[in-house]
Image (cartoon, helix red, strand yellow):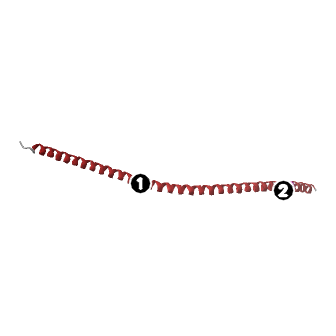
């Protein structure tokens, strides 16, 4: 028997084991590369979604500020309208009282005229 046969078998087994480890490592590297690519893609998608949501939030905050300004303006205008209405009601009440007084005076004057006419008719 060949004295190097045992050494050759050991070397052959070592080569086969190293080739198997290299193949396993290549498979693991491929899996890692795919997992890394997927993770980067998810990260990029999430970053884009965050950017979109931040832009939408900025728009909504601007709209909120605008609506707050509109609300303040409308509240001020409502106050002014209430004041105007109250003033108009007070003026109307004053005019109504004056008109009532005028009607009473006219009615009294009419009664006096009717009495005068009755007196003149009797003569």
Please give the residue where the numbered disc 2 appears in the rendered image: 106
Q: Main secondary structure of the magenta part?
A: helix
What is the secondary structure assignment of the residue under circle 2?
helix
- 8 or 88, which is in the foreground? 8
Q: Earlier in the sequence, mark 2 or mark 1?
A: 1
- Which residue is pictured at 76% across the width and 54% down the height? 90
Residue 47 is tagged as 1
65 magenta-colored = no
**Residue 107 is one of the magenta-drawn residues:** yes
Q: What's the magenta region? A: 104-110
- Image disc number at residue 119: none
Horizontal relation, residue 85 to residue 32: left or right: right
79 or 33: which is nearer to us? 33
Q: Secondary structure at mark 1?
A: helix
User: Measured from the top left, where is residue 67 in percent x and y?
Assistant: 57, 55
**Residue pushed farthest left?**
1
Instruction: Determine the residue positioned at 47% across, 55% down.
Output: 54
Q: Is residue 34 left or right of residue 44?
A: left
Quadrant occupied by the N terminus? top left
Q: Residues within 10 Å of mark 2 (few under 14, many from 20)?
A: few
**In the image, 114: left or right of 3?**
right
Q: Are marks 2 and 1 in contact (CB under 8 Å)?
A: no
Which of 60/83 is in front?
A: 60
From the viewer's side, name the closer residue of 31 and 122.
31
Residue 119, image x, y percentages: 92, 55
Instruction: State the residue at coordinates (71%, 55%).
Output: 83
Residue 86, given in percent of the width and then of the height, sits at 72, 54
Q: Find the distance from the CA under tag 2 to the CA under tag 1.
A: 86 Å
Q: Residue at x 17, y 47 (%)?
A: 15
Please count the marks in the image.
2
Query: Percent x, y for residue 28?
Result: 27, 47
């Amino acid at each position: 028997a060949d004295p190097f046969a045992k050494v050759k078998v050991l070397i052959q087994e070592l080569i086969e084991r190293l080739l198997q480890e290299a193949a396993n490592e290549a498979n693991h590297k491929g899996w890692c590369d795919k997992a890394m690519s997927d993770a980067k893609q998810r990260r990029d998608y999430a970053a884009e979604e965050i950017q979109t949501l931040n832009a939408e939030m900025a728009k909504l905050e601007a709209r909120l500020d605008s609506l707050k300004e509109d609300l303040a303006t409308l509240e001020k205008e409502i106050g002014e309208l209430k004041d105007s209405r109250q003033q108009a009601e007070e003026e109307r009440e004053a005019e109504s009282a004056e008109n009532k007084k005028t009607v009473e005076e006219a009615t009294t004057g009419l009664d006096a005229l009717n009495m005068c006419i009755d007196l003149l008719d009797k003569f």
